[in-house]
Amino acid sequence: MSMYRALILSSPGSRGEKAFAYALKQVGFDAEVLQIDEAIRLRLEQDQLSLKYKLVILPSGNTYSSVVGSGRVLALKIQHALGWNLNRFAERGGLVMGVGSGFESLLHLKVFGEDYALRLNDEAKSQEKWVRVIPTGTRCVWLRGLGTMDLPLNEQNTEFVIDSSAYVEAKGKLDRLGMGCLRGDPSVEPKGDRIWGLCDMTGRIFGLLPHPEYFLSWTNTEDWYINPTRAAAPGSGMAIFENAARYADT
Amino acid sequence: MFVRVETGYKAEFVDPEARRIHQKIMEIHPQLAEKIRWIRKLKCCWLELDGQRDRVIQTIQQVFKIPVTHWLFTGDLLPSAAGSSGTLQDLMQAAPFRPGVFHGIEKRKRFSYHDEEANVIKDVFQTVLGDSHAVKSAITGELLLIEGVKLTQSDLEWISRNWFAGDKSESWSLISEDELKKNARFQGEQVSKYLSNTPSNSRSRLLQFRQMEHPVDESMNWSRIQELFRVTVPVYERQYTQIEEEWTLRPEVRFASDALLLNTRMEMEFHLALQQLEDVAEGFNTHLQTVLGVLPNAKRVWLGEEHGNHPVRVKDEFENSMKDVSETTATPIVQMKLYEDSNETEPSYFWSTTLGISMQKNPSIEGSEKADFIWIGDRESPAYQDLVFVENLKSALQYARDAKAISYVLPCAGLSLLEVLKRATPLSYGFDLFLDGCENWFKSALEKPMTLSQIWGVRPEQKAWLLNELSLRGIPYFHLGTSNLNGDVRVIHQNQVKLQMNIREFFKTEPIEPEELLLDEPIFHTGLKGEKRIQPLRFKNRYAVEELLLKPEQYHASIASPVVLRPDPNFWTGLMVLSDLCGEEFNTVHMEYLLRKCTALGGQIRSMQASMMNGLKPWYQVIKNVESDYGIQLTQFEIVARPDNPSHWLALQLVARLNDIRNIRSEDFKQANDRIYWLPGGFDQPATRWLAGLEGRYQNSLHSAIAIEPSDYSTGKQGMNGVINTLTFALMKRKLGAELRLQHYFPGGFFVSVGENERYAVEEEWAILGIESEWVGKVTSTPHLVIRDEEDRVYTIPIEDLV
């Protein structure tokens, strides 16, 4: 079991830090929650980040009240105040996960390229539901060996969009390189295989819209009491974090 | 540099937030929603940035530009940031009906309100630019872009009021299609207008007020101001003497609104009462003496706002809340029912406190230290008539006092600024006036009377907090000056001392004789021809004293106004009579009636306090002669002249002594078969002394005593009707009747009722004391008045017909 350190970078309005910390602790990480302004005050720059931490989590939430776009202020602070380059961090073996607005921050940081973004879908209603997702390809180290799973979606109904001016090229890049690593189940979803998560070229930076941190045991599901014997079993989200621990050990 | 930034979804995407607004409108107002054919929402930001242009442009791109999903509009700053032209026209192209009729509604956070988004944007700019002073100021807002041919201005206003802008925290304005298409709104001058301290186009009272400040008129006539400052202001010295060292009673009757019933629970009004006491007796120790509650009969409680509540429940709640106040403050409480008047349509819940002042002076008077003083109020008359505004001002004052943020308050209503300053004792050590930003106001207010406004002495350490509170409540204010201890009066304008003089020269006054403030005849007769007549207060809530004081030009009380008993644990009783005599004569006859009314309640009148506004000379004569005519000392006398206010009022308070407050008599006949007597009412008569408890011992046997109204004893038929009126009102309260023998006219005096068993003792005492009396009749249980006249003719009239 690894005892690598994991950084959960919280910011005003972010949520789920404790769930992440719990999950990472369960799989053997030494998780630390650090506020972005505290990180700036401590001058936690790129080199120290690589030295101290093996894993960085950008949690979801209405960070900075979604001023100038969801996750954007966090991205600007990471870029300008901390001076992090997460692609370089991943190249050195670091793991990064962004969920919800953390995923948006990764998109604003352009770790997956410039042509991708998230937008509110047409209803723009906040809703809680479960989505069935299928890991595709072998590039993403977070999803290795995982099959179809249900994950909770716990925020505004956002959807992944590709820049229309470079659509063909950008879409081809995702398919060709296996970056669109988490897709919807076409048999369940009316919109077909929409993209729910992306990974970068190294497969170590993983951004996704559903929340694996809210499915750590079967008691997180709505109908666990129908089959109480499964209550103690770990949820699908835990499998994603176990993958991260396994990769860190290697 | 000043920058305006707008961001919105690209034309190819649906705008979900705008769509939600449309759905909401559809639910509430489908006809209007149908007129909207296309709708978009953009986020706006107004920025004042410091730095090089190129660097600023680069930063704006980094912060605001989301190239995949959003367009960024910045006028000519980033021409290629959106679509083909970089203007809103790119977005308008997406509208299904083209060319279409477009409208814009723009909202922005009010300057004084907390704008969290602007704070985040400032933070981000500072992060990106690495300069903590990069953003001088920022405001955020939104722009709603609507297309619809049939939309009218009122439709757009409805949308913005109900669904788009929060009226308290945001201001909004409508933008025409031409303005939307042009880039003029991005120009520096336009942007800077919103970022300054005085935003325009706002409907709040505060901003309306600020909008009235026109560009600075440089032609300030300093020599004239200096001349005015040197003028010796005539000051009318209030007559004030003290007959009892440990006791004085102030004519402070407040809290007359029907909502008060609920407010008593919150004790807010109660605190206000204590504060008013401190106002009146500035510099003296004060304490609360009694709490008085007056509740009208159940029938009246049934009406008004409490309609639907069971009268008993309303009464219980009232009594409980009074007890709460009493227990909290360990103050004695007296509850009474006094009035029943079928003419009134509003319930008259009423409670008051008797406020005592001990004459021991506080060791130090606050206000002499250096403090900012701030003018607060409104210069336009609508505020004067707006009770909501008055309530706001009152609650703000209370809040500030609770926080000990202010050290003194100078009321300005009805006075010119010069008069206020020259009477201001807290400023007597010297002060500086700052005229920057209020030049026009200063020029007008210096000599002309101001409307409802105050000057507050604010402690410097709490000034920022207090100003924020005022802004939140929409109360206009500005910083007028600073008090200091240097012994000089200085007027400072544009950082220059324009005027300076010694404080002794400034505060020089000359006394004015009271007669100079009095009028020969009522303004009612000389002016106001063709204008709306003043409404008599008797048709309104008769306890609305506060309303009367605030809006004297609209209401006036009548001679039949209430007598309110205000007892005290030390067997002292204040009797307050409030009377307004607009258009009516006030003479010795009326004065006697008022005195008689107090005597009927059982008080021995010892002293009187009076105040009058726009008083007439005959009134003054009557009040001045009270001491010589009746032996009643006038302890306080105040005259206010307000020529601009076409009304008159007179408030009298009689301070009386009562041996036992349980013996208070009320003006109604109590039970059937009581005998009714007439007693003469002159103040030289032994009957009056007996009724007041100075002589005799059987006064307690009286069931009631009623003063006969002044019109009753005039000669002729009218006098007979007056007597009947007095008896009718005394009978109708308990739905009783009477058999009367009225064989001559009664020259004033009292009607008293005595039980059949007690009458022998009472009649014997009257005979011993030489009290003249006459048996008039007896009370009956049927509600009819049976009158036998001098020719033994009998008239039977139902009481209801008389009413």
Image: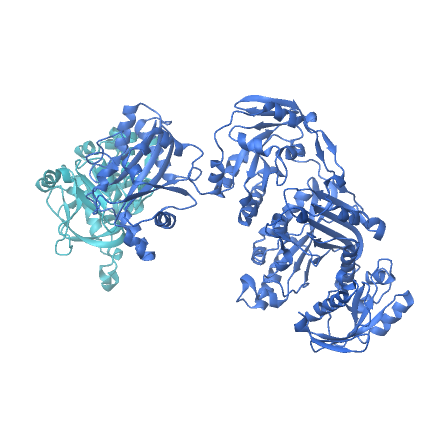
Chain colours: A cyan, B blue
Q: Tell me which corner region of the image, top left, top right, bottom left or bottom right, holds residue A61.
A: top left
Q: Quadrant of the N terminus of chain A?
A: top left
Q: Where is residue B405 shown, x and y percent of the image?
A: 57, 38
User: Is residue B317 visible to us here?
Assistant: yes
Question: Residue visible at 84% across and 53% down?
Answer: B630
In-image side of B533 versus A14 (left or right): right
Across and down, in percent, residue B344 comes to: 61, 62
Residue sitting at the far left:
A176
Q: Where, by quadrant of the figure, is residue B596 drawn? A: bottom right
At a point 46% along the width and 43% down the height, the residue shown is: B204
| Residue B632 % position (x, y) | 82, 51
Q: Is residue A147 above or below residue B365?
A: below
Q: Would you say A73 lies left or right of B83 here?
A: right
Where is residue A7? Give x, y as percent. Answer: 27, 38
Tell how many labels.
0
Q: Residue furthest front?
A: B530
Relative horizontal placement of residue B510, taking residue B449 as reference (left or right): right
Quadrant into which the C terminus of chain A falls:
top left
B490 and B537: which one is in front? B537
Near-viewer residue (A32 or B133): B133
In the foreground, A209 or B407:
B407
Asked whether the viewer can see residue A32, the reply is no
Specify whether B122 is left or right of B564.
left
Kindly identify the residue that appears in the image at 38 percent across and 42 percent down: B172
Q: Quadrant of residue A203?
A: top left
